[in-house]
Image (cartoon, coloured by chain):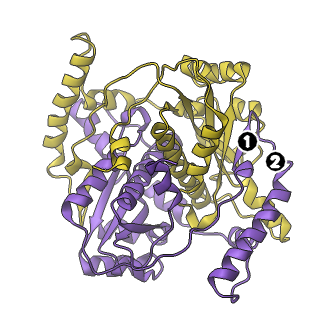
Chain colours: A purple, B yellow
Amino acid sequence: MNEVIRFMKSHRSIRKFTDKPIEDHLLKEIIESAQWASSSTFVQAYSIIGIKNPQTKKRLAYLCGEQPYIASCPVFLVFCADLHRLKMACEIHGTEMVGEYTESFIMATVDTALASQNAMLAAESLGLGGVYIGGIRNNPQEVSELLKLPEHVYPVFGICLGYPAEDPERKPRLPVEVVYKEEIYDDRADLEKIREYDKVISEYYLVRTKGKRNDTWTRQMAEKMQKETRPHMKEFLTKRGFLMK
Amino acid sequence: MNEVIRFMKSHRSIRKFTDKPIEDHLLKEIIESAQWASSSTFVQAYSIIGIKNPQTKKRLAYLCGEQPYIASCPVFLVFCADLHRLKMACEIHGTEMVGEYTESFIMATVDTALASQNAMLAAESLGLGGVYIGGIRNNPQEVSELLKLPEHVYPVFGICLGYPAEDPERKPRLPVEVVYKEEIYDDRADLEKIREYDKVISEYYLVRTKGKRNDTWTRQMAEKMQKETRPHMKEFLTKRGFLMK
């Protein structure tokens, strides 16, 4: 196993951080690493807002569904899908941007995610840790106002970054055969494999909580997916110029 | 610069491959590395279909907009956003999945992209190279039929993988100050920085084509973004159970 893969396979979310700030040159290295991810026809359709101001972080912690580690991490990165810059390019050349299609939304969202994964891994390789915050989509309108995001920009997720003050275990992933399929999507063996995985996850929780939590992956998923989540997203996104067609 | 960041910053798309196949254990290592990316509340809402069959690759090369490297690469990976498996979890527990919201679409699309970036970087760290294929969304219905994707699964992009038979230059990214902003989205300095970047990209093309191609980033973007692309995506996705609300 090489260094790159070793760091990938060491990943776990970190939610407790020491007081040590992140050095500016490291933060720059992380952002520059993010930029080297692939980008759909080179649009580079994302922006990253770095938040260090304690008041802003406190407000974001609340807006993201009371997640205290957003306030306690030294740097909170907000990853935004961004077509605004492409509109600037159109204006320079006297053309008009067609950005309201679902395709542009996918393109910008994927670009943002690719960059973020490089950012997370680069941070981990530098001794930092972090956690993704999908809760940024709990109140996307308020977040957009707070960070002064223009039209055609939306916050996809955040990442809390800092020096780890905890050392949690890695959470076992689905069996590789369930996630990876050859030639066609054949799910006939999946049910059995997923039930085996439930046992692995159950054991993970029992050990981690010293017997207090007994849970499985499918039960968690069934509970999560039976509820509507963030039903405001469609209206919010169309207001911001996305997903209209 | 550590090994991880060095590999990130060495990234460029590879479209020409040697005849050498990818060893099975390396392919497995790549997929397992992908799985260690973060996942929104651990849904792991993606699947990867590995295509080696020459006929299928040839057909996909055509469906993706006549991209011959899909046929010539030893392995073509199709990355799919996948809520189907979560529906299985719901069925195990007798609940019904609510998956038609825009939020579920974002969640699955982001999960897919995060995993793919690990896959790409892991592959590069093992001496392989590749290129993302957004063209999989040119004919997503036909691709879905060919790969027998069930409802609640859609192909987000592909990746051609193989041993590089070319050594292209890295393509300079936007200035870091344009992509990264502190505390709020402030774009007042962006226009000037983007114009400077246009000069960098112009130089890149001139050197690379020995003076034949004179182009800038903003001109490319203006041309691309004035056209509607893949206007079928919304209808396709709603038919597959996504983005209905």
Residue at horizontal 81%, vertical 57%?
A193
Which of the 4 image quadrants contains residue B10?
Answer: top left
Q: Is residue A12 left or right of residue A95?
A: right
Mark nearer the N terminus (2 vs 1)? 1
Q: Is residue B4 left or right of residue B22?
A: left
**Neighbour tally class for label 1: few under 14, some 14-19, many 20 plus, Cα within 10 Å:** some
Q: CA distance from mark 2 to mark 1?
A: 9 Å
**Which residue does the numbered mark 2 point to in the structure image?**
A187
Which of the 4 image quadrants contains residue B92?
Answer: bottom right
**Neighbour tally class for label 2: few under 14, some 14-19, many 20 plus, Cα within 10 Å:** some
**Which residue does the numbered mark 1 point to in the structure image?**
A181
Quarter in which the C terminus of chain B is drawn: bottom right
- Residue A245 visible? The answer is no
The location of residue A234, given as percent across then percent down, is 54, 59
Count every numbered label the image shows and give the total. 2
Which element type, helix, strand or loop, lies under badge 1? Answer: strand
Which element type, helix, strand or loop, lies under badge 2? Answer: loop
- Residue A201 visible? The answer is yes
The location of residue A222, given as percent across then percent down, is 75, 70
Q: Chain of mark 1?
A: A
Residue at horizontal 24%, vertical 67%?
B183
Q: Amino acid at mark 2?
A: Asp
Q: Amino acid at mark 1?
A: Lys
The location of residue A192, given as percent across then percent down, is 85, 58
Contact between labelled residues 1 and 2, with CB atoms less than 8 Å apart: yes
Q: Is residue B20 left or right of residue A37?
A: right
